[in-house]
Image (spheres, helix red, strand yellow):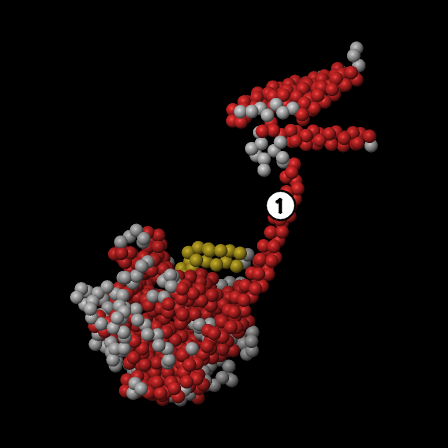
Amino acid sequence: MNLWLIPLLPMAGAVVNGLLGRRFSKNVVTAIGLAFPGAAMLWAWKVALQFASLPATAIPHVENHGAWLRAGDFAANYGLYLDQLSLLMALIVTGVGFLIHVYSVGYMAHEGGYYRFFSYMNLFMFFMLTLVLANNYLLMFVGWEGVGLASYLLIGFFFLRDSAAAAGKKAFIVNRIGDFGFLIALFLLIKNFGTLDFAAVFEKASALPQEATTGLLTIIGLLLLVGACGKSAQLPLYVWLPDAMEGPTPVSALIHAATMVTAGVYMIARSHAIFDRAPIALTVVAIIGCATALYAATIGTVQHDIKRVLAYSTISQLGYMVLACGVAAYSAGMFHLMTHAFFKALLFLAAGSVIHALGGEQDMRKMGGLRQHIPGTFWTMTVATFAIAGIFPLSGFFSKDEILYRSWASPFGSWGFWAVGVFSAFLTAFYMFRLWFLTFFGEFRGEPAVHHEPERAGQEHHAQSHRIHESPRVMLIPLVILAVLSFAGGWIGWPQALGGSHHFEHFLAPVFEEHVTSHEVPAALPAESHAPSEIALTLAATGAALLGIALGWLLYYKRRDLPAKLRERFQGAYTTLENKYYVDEIYAWLFVKPIVEGSRNILWRVVDAGAIDGTINETAEAARDVSNVVRRMQSGNIRSYAGWVALGGAAVVAYMVWLGVR
Amino acid sequence: MVPLFYYLVLSAILFGCGIAGFLMKRNIITIFMCIELMLNGVNLAFVAFAAHWQQLSGQVFVFFVMVVAAAEAAVGLAIIISVFRTRETLNVDRVNLLKL
């Protein structure tokens, strides 16, 4: 099926634009930057059509392109692996990725480094597709690191701004911590299984019994979780994602919402054969996901920057996906991954459109009443907002409902996960509608001055509120397509409880079931019957969402004076939330400061300046002192040289005479 | 027959004169001639020993020394001429540009 074309096409685009883009005209850069990811998307669809006609025995379809490295018994190949899971990911990445590329044409039109942007974006697509299509953990790790690199480059895209450069570094360094865990997990796999090939690892892992206590698989699972926490911005390694909003908005949409940050979820789902046999690791995964979902949602309720609200929302939604993986409901997690990719990409792009319309303003306190000015953005964003809040029948409803149901009903679930999840869903609805009302309703609160965008002639003298302009069509069309997907994308997972057939779960079932059934779940775990019926849970979750919407409506539309009063009433809690629980400060005090101070005072002043430089300086000084004495021989007087020669000759003669005498 | 000892004494005297002139003279041509003098002192010792021990190797060595001396004279005189052209002096004490 020539799978290799899917990642390599964007790579070609990245190389062409990266090397030659400076000389190309803008239109050529655009054409190249769109054509290659577009071709990759078409090829992915072609592969999908071929995949549909494959017999079940031919799945997973593996394509091997020769050996990569060989060390003793260990070998890794350039191999690509296509099953339902990687096909789904490839389609999401190429599809959403291509739409965001199209959007970027409009959004980045006035920015410098246009070719650089498209080169990086295509590079990201290459690494992301490598990540999802790899057939062994090592190649996956290449993609894993590569998307980190692309993320770093794109967060720091406006590298002249200090905060952007710092945010890029922060993302890179925090991800290093996660990658460290991932790497150790890979080493353990090599040591114990002798291979990193997916099929071989899963086969060997499946042969092991389920671990009642901590064992090898539990440790590997927990280390993989550390990697996932870094990449998917889970507690406690989420801190880089909000700062990553320094990047251009299409980057936030593509990398920090729709695709890259879901790599951790994909990785856990892919490694389910390991997690299925390590209940303790699974429980930790679920707890982390659950805690992250709640934690980030609470912060999201008080942020003022429109992109930061969405960033915390992303962290929270990723928490849901991880929670789903943690209760072994992998297909529910992947389902939410897909719908989230649609509606969160749409939210970011729409937010970008709002920012674009206001000429760079991101503070929601300076927005408001934009509904008439930018109707296209308003309506698409409305779809996304209802979708993420989980309102029937939009896509978010189905996926979130699925996760919440599983978090209780699954053998690994509990009512605690469900309760936290529902409360987070309530918060999600609240902060999203807060954003929605603040941005699009009420009076415009911006200052009537600042505006950098070049405008049509004759409008310059108007205030900002009159200069607000709808985004160009090249930005609106991706919004509309994503809005349709956000609306209807969930219908392929219509649950049986609501009279559907849940195609999505059946589609992914072969990936996740083959390993589960080979060993029975221990009887000690609660059976599914303990949970209330799916309908009841669905109603409860929808009720929570509606409550959140109602609260958002009350506080930010009906009674605009209430938030200020509440803020005064709960000053302490509000400040804590506004400062994100002071986690950045705590990390700075706990990790950054000791390292910086230790480096400065010990490593620099003592070890480097004292020991290393000192040794070299002392050596040099000693050589100079000796030379100072010896150089007196080099008087420059030829006859004195001759004298030295004669003296030397005499010394040699004397020595030989002495030898002869002896 | 003249005893070996006489030859060696004459050789040593020649060599000593060469060293003394080499160390004391300032004119570079003179120094050069003193080097020739030392070489010839050594040559004399070589042939004296060759005759004394009835071995040809000493005489062969003298030829080598002569060849080297001829080459040295050619190169050395060339250097002296070029030094004179640039410095306009033959006094070695004033050829000290590389001095610290």
Residue type of the residue flagged with mark 1: Arg
- Tally the numbered discs: 1
In the image, taking residue B37 as reference, residue A662 lies left or right, namely right
* Quadrant housing residue A253: bottom left
Question: Residue A216: x and y, percent?
Answer: 55, 71
Query: Of helix, strand and loop, which one carries label 1?
Result: helix
The residue carrying mark 1 is A624
Residue that extends furthest to the left in the rendered view of this protein = A458
Residue A124 horizontal/vertical position (percent) = 37, 62
Residue A92 seen from this side: no
For residue A568, above or below residue A461 = below
Q: Image height check: is A530 above or below A440?
A: below
Residue A561 x %, y %? 31, 86
> Residue at 62% of width from left, 30% of height from top?
A638
The C terminus of chain A lies in quadrant: top right
Please state the horizontal and vertical placement of residue A415, each as a whole percent of the image: 44, 86
Is residue B59 placed above or below B99 in the rendered structure?
above
Label 1: chain letter: A
Observer able to see residue A113: yes
* In-front residue for pair A90/A391: A391
The residue at the point 61 percent across, 55 percent down is A614
The residue most toward the right is A662
The residue that appears at 62% across and 51% down in the rendered structure is A618
- Which residue corresponds to the image point at 53% horizontal and 56% vertical from the top-left? A71
Image: A545 above or below A210: below
Choose top left, top right, bottom left or bottom right for residue B38. Answer: top right
Q: Nearer the viewer, residue B30 or A7?
A: B30
- Mark 1, other Cα within 10 Å: few <14 / some 14–19 / many ≥20: few
